Image (tube, grey):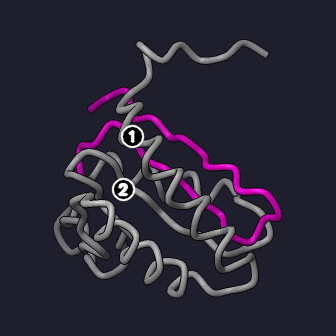
Amino acid sequence: MQMPQIDKMIYPELSYKVCGLCFYIHNRLGRYRNEKQYGDALEVAFDEAGIIHKREKRLPASFVGEKSYRNIPDFIIEDKLIVDLKAKTIITKDDYFQMRRYLVSYKKRLGLIINFRQKYLRPKRILNKFA
């Protein structure tokens, strides 16, 4: 498997910091908490690390009549990166499509899906090449 080139990655330093804090939280809390608990712990870690973030900001409606309460990502980091937390057995295509909706609606280039339920944390990078 070929390693990604760091100079072609989107927001490598920021995503590295965010993933590092997620690993820290996963090691500290374990893998059997709920999504909100991981979000609370991660929010404290972001504050302590000086990372600017917004938690659970509603997406703008993408068409007339859409209910905006249906699309709420967990974190928007430094107005660049969307982070969606999960606490479930596996990440599904629906989770991927949900992140794609977030990226398109917010016009962001990079999203991270973090599943805390797994024994080993494996952040998933989702790119929006149209932003």
Q: Is residue 18 above or below residue 34?
A: above
Mark 1 surroundings: few (<14), some (14-19) or many (≥20) residues within 10 A:
many
Numbered label attached to residue 102: 2
The answer to whether residue 30 is left or right of residue 129 is right
The C terminus, quarter of image:
top left
| Place of residue 42 in the rendered image (x, y in percent of width and height, measured from the top left) | 45, 72
The answer to whether residue 33 is left or right of residue 128 is right
Circle 2 sits in a helix, a strand or a loop, which is it?
helix
| Place of residue 12 in the rendered image (x, y in percent of width and height, measured from the top left) | 41, 31
Residue at the spot 35% in from the left edge and 73% down from the top edge:
72
Circle 1 sits in a helix, a strand or a loop, which is it?
strand
| Place of residue 126 in the rendered image (x, y in percent of width and height, measured from the top left) | 50, 41
The answer to whether residue 40 is left or right of residue 107 is right
Stretch of the chain drawn in magenta: 106-131
Query: Which image quadrant for residue 129?
Result: top left
Kind of residue indicated by mark 2: Tyr
Magenta stretch contains residue 17: no
| Place of residue 97 in the rendered image (x, y in percent of width and height, measured from the top left) | 53, 53
Mark 2 surroundings: few (<14), some (14-19) or many (≥20) residues within 10 A:
many
Numbered label attached to residue 128: none
Residue at the spot 58% in from the left edge and 70% down from the top edge:
25
Marker count (numbered): 2
The N terminus, quarter of image:
top right
Q: Is residue 125 above or below residue 102?
A: above
Front label number (2 vs 1): 1
